[in-house]
Every structure is written in structure tokens, then in C-alpha cells.
Image: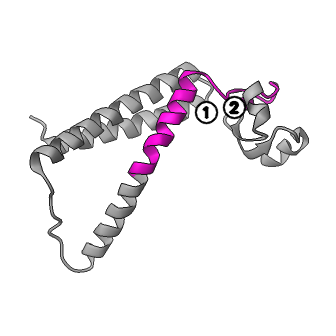
Amino acid sequence: MLSHAGLNATLNAVSACLLSAGYFCVRTGRILAHKTCMILAFTSSTIFLVSYVIYHVRVGSVHFQGQGWIRPVYFTLLGTHTILAIVIVPMVILTLSRALREKCFGCHSERSPPQADESRNPSAFCASREGNFRGWKSFDDQSQSSRFR
């Protein structure tokens, strides 16, 4: 039987593998596979979060027993991890909701003009359909897009 810690580690590993696979899929133009990987990664991460909360509700606070130089290292990692874990939740929800509504995909293609929503926001984070990072680019200045390739 898998321990609770083992379950959580497995769920995190599955999420990491799915995120990596989704990245590979989008870079190779397999959009449906990318979407599937991202939804499964979100599901795996959500199950992890529920499992993690259930564990800590049942067990309570677990104090770090380490001493010496590792103690400040551990608490530095714990602090930054906690802050980033809190900050990423709204970012994931926003990104997933936009993706599921298929919003803001006009900037992903060199050939497509900006969508109505994108034209109100002249700066947008874009990547081409082939996966080449173009960075922050203004839709008003299409001629500068070549410097990002």
C-alpha cells in the first residue's frame, strides 16, 4: 500500500511528467494532445492539493527536526515554496479558464490579426504556433516581431 507521502510524491511526479509532455506537444504542433496533458496535469495537481490538505488536517503541524546549516536552508526553501504555491493558484485558474474559453490565441499565429480583446491590450505575451518564443510584443508594431525570433 502506498503511504500518504508516497501518494503525494506520485501525484507531483505525474503532474511534472504531464506538464513536460504538454510542453513537448505544443512545441511539435499537437494542440489537442497539449490540451489533454494540461487538463490532466491540472487534475493531478488538484488531487495532490486535496490529499495534502487532508493529510495535514489529520496529522497537524509537522515540525522540522534538522539542526545546523540545513535548518536555515530548509526554512528558506519552505518559505519561497509556500509563497510561490499561493501565487500560482490564481495564475493557473486564469490561464486554464482562458484556455478552455479559447481566449487570446490570436497572437499565437504570425498570420492572424489581433483579436478584438487583444487590440485593447497592445502588449501581449506571445509564442508562435511553432513554439518560437517572441517575448512581449506590441500588436501595433508588427515590424519589430522579427527581432524576437
Indicate the amino acid at tag 2. Answer: Glu
Tag 2–tag 1 contact (CB < 8 Å): yes
Question: x and y percent of residue 32 in the render?
Answer: 54, 19
On screen, residue 104 versus residue 1, left or right, reads right
For disc 2, the neighbor class at 10 Å (few under 14, some 14 to 19, many from 20) is: few
For disc 1, the neighbor class at 10 Å (few under 14, some 14 to 19, many from 20) is: some
- Residue denoted by label 1: 27
Question: x and y percent of residue 80 in the render?
Answer: 39, 61
On screen, residue 147 versus residue 88, left or right, reads right
- Residue ID at (40%, 57%): 83
- Quarter of the image for residue 11 reads top left
- Quarter of the image for residue 119 reads top right
Q: Can residue 149 be seen in this view?
A: no
Q: How is the image coloured?
A: one colour
| Magenta region | 85-114
Question: x and y percent of residue 123 in the render?
Answer: 76, 43
Which mark identifies residue 39? none
Q: Is mark 2 on a helix, strand or loop?
A: loop
Q: What element carries label 1?
A: helix
- Residue ID at (15%, 45%): 57
Please state, as top left, top right, bottom left or bottom right, where the N terminus lies in the image: top left
On screen, residue 59 versus residue 23, left or right, reads left
How many numbered circles does the render carry? 2
Membership of 26 in magenta stretch: no
Which mark identifies residue 130? 2
Please state, as top left, top right, bottom left or bottom right, where the C terminus lies in the image: top right
